[in-house]
Image (tube, rainbow, N blue to C red):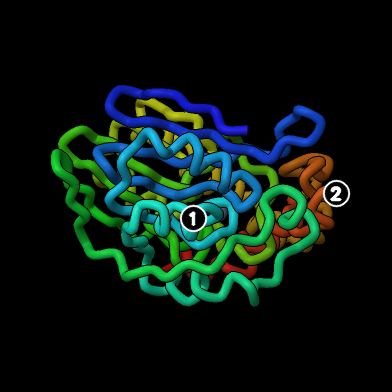
Amino acid sequence: MVHVEQVGQVWKFRMARSVAGRPLYFTSAYWVDGLLIDTGCAHTADEFLGVMKDFPVKLIVNTHSHEDHIGANAVLSSYYHCPIMVHESGIQALASTHNARLKPYQHVMWGRPSQSRALPVPEVVETDHHQFRILYTPGHCSDHICLLEANLGWLFCGDAFLGGRDRALRRDYNIWQIISSLKFLVGFGPRVLFPGSGTVKEGAEQELYLKIAYLEDMGHRALEYARVGWSRRRIARKLFGREMTINYITLGHFSGKNLVRSFLDDYSFGET
Ligand SMILES: [Zn+2]
């Protein structure tokens, strides 16, 4: 299913594979002034193309190379004959999706994207009426970028900002790098967040500060518990409670224990 909603000058597309009429997991793309930011997952690619035919697309920019953000790259770029841009470190991932090792839950929720050819995104992307500064924000993955429209305070932040209070992390994310990227973003004074989840948020600066404070508090508590000899399992239980459903769905790829592991093992990053 693809839900379309206008948010001021920006159009938002929330997409999810549906099974028996129920969405499995939503991911979002945004369109403004001929620029399409992310393209959803492979399972919704054809439906998304059908919806997008009413919107002229001159350029596709991917916030990162995860399969739920690049799924319709191939069909859309061939329909519009438009370029795709991504951080230079993500070009190879987009070109070799056939070799990506997806977990069972990734196949079920999002599917395997077709390969697509991308160009390195420049420091500034211009549309007819807007300028978007490209901000490098690793942590969620190494090729993550955000797009800032500084005049209007729009921040298209992909998965660099996730709403809510994090209680689980994917095994390969780096939580201290995520925090560092959030601090980098808040320095630009954004006003509206357009995240990959599709939950657009006003008061962007405040949202980012709250997220940073929460994650740093959890991180410092995890380090303190580890210093006095607590096991990772015990720290995770203390800070985040029982493992969430996502832990079982993803067979442990996302878990509270992974979040603790990153707080402890990746801490050297936070000291730099
Ligand atoms: Zn992602």
Q: Residue at the spot x=43%, y=72% of the render?
A: 91
Give me the C-alpha separation between circle 1 and circle 2.
33 Å
Image quarter where the N terminus lies is top right
Instruction: Indicate the amino acid at tag 1.
Output: Val
**Which residue is under mark 2?**
248
203 relative to 28, above or below: above
Q: Horizontal placement of 58 versus 68: left or right?
A: left
- Sooner in the amino-acid sequence: mark 1 or mark 2: 1
Position of residue 169 measured from the top left corner of the image (x, y, whole percent): 66, 53
Q: Horizontal placement of 179 versus 57: left or right?
A: right
Q: Nearer the viewer, mark 1 or mark 2?
A: 1
Among the 4 quarters of the image, the one containing residue 227 = bottom right
Q: Residue at the spot x=63%, y=66% of the render?
A: 172
Q: Quadrant of ligand 1?
A: bottom right
Position of residue 221 measured from the top left corner of the image (x, y, whole percent): 63, 49
Q: Are marks 1 and 2 in contact (CB under 8 Å)?
A: no
Image quarter where the C terminus lies is bottom left
User: Is residue 141 among what the camera can see?
Assistant: yes
What is the crowding at mark 2: few (fewer than 14 residues within 10 Å), some, or many (at least 20)?
few
**Which residue is under mark 1?**
75
Q: Horizontal placement of 86 versus 220: left or right?
A: left
The front one of 246 and 43 is 43
Instruction: Indicate the amino acid at tag 2.
Output: Tyr
